[in-house]
Image (cartoon, rainbow, N blue to C red):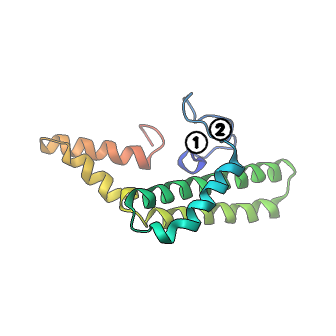
């Protein structure tokens, strides 16, 4: 599922797919209750698996999706509060959504595969000339920091 956090902000961003695509659904295509139960099971066994690199990566990745799904629920509640003209509720939900974004940032900082520096360095390493290195770095940064070619 495409996280709403990764999309250009707009009021109807939970409408089904990322703008201009038919392959990045913004609403879960899975049973969320089963997904959360699986995640809870991963969290429970995590202390015994903390040295198993693939498990740790998966735990961070699945936890990221849990936060993205929570953000979706908050955003849908925000839309509802807006429709009902409830500014205090909207403010509370805005704060909660910003906290989820902060939590996701903190979570992703716990694993090197989710760090921007590694992403950029890996992209630059593919270049065979200085110009290619710069192009690949620009493309790598564009993929994770902008909403479209012109940002």
The answer to whether residue 102 is visible is no
The answer to whether residue 136 is visible is yes
Of labels 1 and 2, the one closer to you: 2
Give the Cα distance between marks 1 and 2. 7 Å
Q: Relative to residue 13, is residue 101 depicted above or below?
A: below
Percent across and percent down for residue 23 are 54, 30
From the image, tell me which residue sits under label 1.
Answer: 1
In depth, the one of 134 and 125 nearer the eye is 125
- Tell me the residue at 81%/49% (across/down): 80
Q: Residues within 10 Å of mark 2 (few under 14, many from 20)?
A: few
Q: Residues within 10 Å of mark 1 (few under 14, many from 20)?
A: some
Q: Relative to residue 38, is residue 130 depicted above or below?
A: above
Percent across and percent down for residue 145 are 43, 50
Q: Is residue 72 left or right of residue 108?
A: right
- Tell me the residue at 39%/67% (across/down): 51
- Confirm or deny contact between disc 1 and disc 2 (CB under 8 A): yes
Percent across and percent down for residue 108 are 46, 62
**What mark, if any, has residue 29 been given in the picture?**
2
Q: Relative to residue 11, is residue 114 depicted above or below?
A: below
| Quarter of the N terminus within the rendering | top right
């Amino acid at each position: 599922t495409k996280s709403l956090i990764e999309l250009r902000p707009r009021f109807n961003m939970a409408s089904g797919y990322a703008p201009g695509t038919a392959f990045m659904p913004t609403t879960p295509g899975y049973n969320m209750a089963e997904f959360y139960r699986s995640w809870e099971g991963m969290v429970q066994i995590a202390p015994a698996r903390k040295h198993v690199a693939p498990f740790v990566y998966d735990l961070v990745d699945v936890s990221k999706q849990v936060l993205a799904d929570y953000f979706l629920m908050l955003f849908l509640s925000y839309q509802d509060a807006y429709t009902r003209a409830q500014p205090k509720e909207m403010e509370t939900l805005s704060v909660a959504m910003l906290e989820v974004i902060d939590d996701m940032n903190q979570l992703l900082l716990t694993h090197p595969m989710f760090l921007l520096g590694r992403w950029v360095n890996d992209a630059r390493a593919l270049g065979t000339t200085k110009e290619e290195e710069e192009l690949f770095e620009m493309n790598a940064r564009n993929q994770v920091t902008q909403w479209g070619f012109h940002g």
